[in-house]
Image (cartoon, helix red, strand yellow):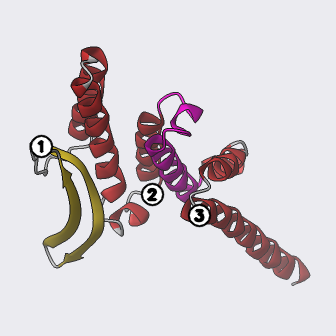
Amino acid sequence: MKRVLFSIAAIALIANVNAQNLNKVKDALEEKNLMVAKQEIDGLMAKPEYTAKPDVWFWKGMVENELSKDDKTRTSCADCKLEAVQSFKRYLELDKKGVLMVTRLGAPMYELYNGFLEEGNKAYTTENIAMAYDQFNKALSERNENQHFAEITFIGIETATIKEYKQLEKILYVTVDFVAEI
């Protein structure tokens, strides 16, 4: 009986430690303290017991996605956007239902595709055609590989930020702030 109670207590302690570690990552992301979030998630990924946990892969993708958006931090990974895509793919392999992704209606992946397109647009407007091609190609190949085909394209949009998204029955409602080029 003592062994059973000890085992239950040990499992509860481990689960609590796991939650606390991920909370550090989430808190750092919420506070826009991206390098702390990266250090925390990298610390977790260095431990084999965490690499089998889908939630850790999801939050690794979230950290890499945020790093890719910030000019100061995007050099902290070889290709933060692509690494985020790979982390989200690994998450979905480990969690077939993809609850964390579904509750966000797939927005993290669409943000990454949009990020590739924005980088491609910036490169194109500065006449860096090779980089523009690379970024547009990444957006298309990742989108096609993941079979995400629904999108609306606007010409002349400088930025688009998803403000709110919710699903009611089979309808997806998305509120987006657009900034147009003038």
* 88 lies left or right of 34: left
- Callout 1 environment at 10 Å: few (<14), some (14 to 19), or many (20+)? few
**Which residue, given by chain and number where applicable, does mark 3 sit on?**
31
Confirm whether the magenta stretch covers residue 21.
no
* 55 lies left or right of 158: right
Tag 1 near tag 2, CB within 8 Å: no
Could you tell me which residue is drawn at 59 percent across and 34 percent down? Answer: 76
Marks 1/2: CA–CA distance: 38 Å
Q: Secondary structure at mark 1?
A: loop
Type of residue at label 1? Gly
Type of residue at label 2? Asp
Type of residue at label 3? Glu
Picture coordinates of residue 35 (x, y %)?
Answer: 64, 47
Toward the right, the furthest residue is 2
**Which residue, given by chain and number where applicable, does mark 2 sit on?**
95
* 27 lies left or right of 176: right
- Position above or below: 53 against 15: above
Picture coordinates of residue 24 (x, y %)?
Answer: 68, 63
Marks 3/2: CA–CA distance: 27 Å
Q: Main secondary structure of the magenta part?
A: helix
Q: Which mark is residue 156?
A: 1
Could you tell me which residue is drawn at 55 percent across and 33 percent down? Answer: 77
Residue 168 appears in which quarter of the rendering? bottom left
Picture coordinates of residue 2 (x, y %)?
Answer: 90, 82
Q: Nearer the viewer, mark 3 or mark 2?
A: 3
Chain part drawn in magenta? 53-79
